[in-house]
Amino acid sequence: MNDLKNKVALITGGTGGIGSAICDRLAHAGARIVTTYRNEEKAKAWAAERAYDPMIVHCDVGSYDDCSGMKEAIEAAMGPPDIIVNNAGITRDATFKKATPDHWRQVITADLDSMFNVSHQFVIGMTERGWGRVVNISSINGQKGAFGQTNYSAAKAGVHGFTMALAQEVARKGVTVNTVSPGYIATEMVMAVREEVRDQIIAQIPVGRLGKPEEIAALVAFLVSDDAAFITGANLSANGGQHMH
């Protein structure tokens, strides 16, 4: 399977659970993988474990200047990306009563500003070349909201607004832009939650289990393929039926 042979794929936050699965899946499809990191030690260990040779670039996706530097580094080493997966993000959960301006700003910067900061570096080049794929990772909680996540839910809802608007601007240029909204996935972060809390979450999922990072990666791999060329501006939910709309 080499549908993406020689395509350059940038996955932000690719050393985490879902990001790592996306990197592996796109590499298996033939893409040349680039990912961003904040923690150099973790990123180098992650890269050493891969069966392929990913490029890792230090970048704070919440900073436009950092993203400009990332663009220069990637294009010098690999050429311009054909595929962007905006996956990096953080949470700073707190009830609205206890939330601080820092809680709000950190999440909006990392999870929403990053959509512009990263995409703005590369999408114009994609339109000029006549082919490109952008996949923005949102969340079930951007669709239904979540207690203690006014910041995260707002940012993740904003992700799809960004997707729909950008998709309209670049559709005639061979570039598609889509959102994927995962539900609760069995990543390290979710598995670190206390078992009784995790069981309560699973009880709300009709299929009766957490999702697998590989299932999100498979959906992303489809969206960046030529088979998905007629899909743009869409928000694809992968949540085990927990939120249907």
Image: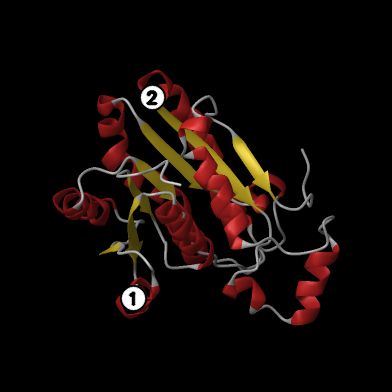
Q: Which amino acid type is shown beneath numbered disc 2?
A: Gly
Q: Is residue 127 visible?
A: yes
Q: Is residue 122 left or right of residue 171?
A: left
Q: Is residue 53 left or right of residue 169?
A: left
Choose top left, top right, bottom left or bottom right for residue 93.
bottom right
Q: Residue at x 40, y 55 (%)?
A: 27
Q: Going by the picture, which residue comes out furthest to the left?
A: 76
Q: Which residue is mark 2?
A: 174
**Tag nearer the camera, 1 or 2:** 1
Q: Which mark is residue 228?
A: none
Q: Which mark is residue 48?
A: 1
Q: Is residue 209 above or below residue 30?
A: below
Choose top left, top right, bottom left or bottom right for residue 43.
bottom left
Q: Nearer the viewer, residue 162 or 81?
A: 81
Pinpoint residue 74: horizontal percent, then vertical percent.
21, 52
Disc 1 secondary structure class: helix
Quarter of the C terminus within the rendering: top right
Q: Nearer the viewer, residue 76 or 184?
A: 76
Q: Going by the picture, which residue comes out furthest to the front?
A: 1
